[in-house]
Amino acid sequence: MPKLDQFVSQKLGELEQKQRYRVLKESLREQGVWVTRCGKKLLSFSCNDYLGLSQHSKVNAAAHRASGTNGVGAGASRLITGNHRFYTELEEKLAAMKGTEAALVFGSGYLANIGIIPALVKKGDLILADKLVHACLLDGATLSGATLKRFAHNNMVHVNQLLAKYRAQYRHCLILTDTVFSMDGDLAPIVELRELADEYDAWLLSDDAHGLGMLTRDESLPQAHLQMGTLSKAVGAYGGYVCASKKVIDYLVTSARSFVFSTALPPMIVAAALEALNVMEAECGLRERTLELARFFAQELNLPVPESAIVPLILGEEGKALNASKQLENLGFLVAAIRPPTVPVGTARLRFTFSALHEKQDVVRLIAAVRMLESLD
Ligand SMILES: *Cc1c(COP(=O)(O)O)cnc(C)c1O
């Protein structure tokens, strides 16, 4: 066997032993919340398309209109010739929604984080990140070369301690958090984090990937200095963004390498995202409907009251989560098992996500199926 294949075979063997080997399965999202996987039609509780906008007729029509006039690919990065006028409209809309002066759209949420963080901090600077932040914030932190320290999940006493102990030793300090934690569904205390950031002359970056469209913004409350997020979850399209002051956005345009050196999104995607934000505002009942389904599910199973459309059922070992997911699949449900390294060791889980396209009856059937799972405790 070639050396490279030998090397990866050994790596794959190790993953298999830990039950962390992952393979791709063809998954066709056709209508609503149904996914056909390996020829079997399953009711999905694993999509992040919380409002069903990825399939909304108006969003779809906007994408078709745009591809009709603009074709598919953008042709170049935004600084060269890829900066279609749809971008201006989308960025103005995002800034208005978040209450900031400006916004900048990136190729994806992942690209946004690995571009923004290294543009702002470097070696000699400090990054404090919640223990449960999304992997792409950590990748951005690693790329930046700044010193990274983690604080216990949502623990403001710990953040305060770290700032008191270390802040003075570093030039700049950036604090990273999710607004809605992607695998737990709980919320970060943004107001407290912002107060601490201001007190210690630090900057706060919040990742609102699972919040946009799902949380309502209280305009009287302070927000993070940098509010990033994705257009691929509740917005149902693709792309990432950051909302901040005009000065910060002007700087990121020339300094975020994942922005400068990557091709612009296809105009049809930008048009679709813009239309989805309009639909989101016009049909504000979708959000409440989704959250109501999540709350109903949790209540029936005696789980903590969810703060978002994400409800975890923590099972512990990898095998337990895989087994539970398989049992649900046999009953016609698609609920992905989430394992390390996506979540901390010993907290493998089922992660249920709800959508405005689910019927209450779907959730009733899911509850019955979860109650039937063997060896849950
Ligand atoms: C999904 C996700 C991202 C990445 O966004 P993409 O647009 O899918 O690259 C970033 N942060 C969080 C918290 C996420 O859940």
Image: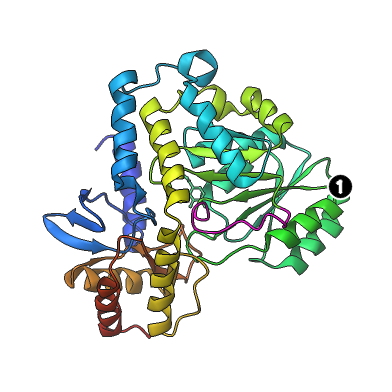
In the rendered image, the quadrant that contains the C terminus is bottom left
Residue numbers of the magenta segment:
210-222
Specify the farthest residue to the front: 282
Specify the farthest residue to the right: 168
Taking the image as shown, residue 4 lies to the left or right of residue 192, namely left
Taking the image as shown, residue 329 lies to the left or right of residue 88, namely left
Residue 339 x/y as whole percent:
40, 63
Residue visible at 83% across and 40% down? 171
Residue visible at 53% across and 55% down? 211
Residue visible at 43% across and 61% down? 285
Disc 1 marks which amino acid?
Gln
Residue 69 x/y as whole percent:
32, 19
* Residue 125 in which image quadrant: top right
Residue visible at 65% across and 25% down? 255
On whether residue 217 falls in the magenta region, the answer is yes
Q: Nearer the viewer, residue 229 or 260?
A: 229
Q: Nearer the viewer, residue 68 or 151?
A: 68
Residue 279 x/y as whole percent:
41, 46
* Residue 91 in which image quadrant: top right
Residue 22 x/y as whole percent:
31, 54
Element under disc 1: helix
Question: Could you tell me what secondary structure mostly forms the magenta stretch?
Answer: loop
Q: Is residue 243 visible?
A: yes
* Residue 290 in which image quadrant: bottom left
Q: Is residue 128 above or below residue 340?
A: above
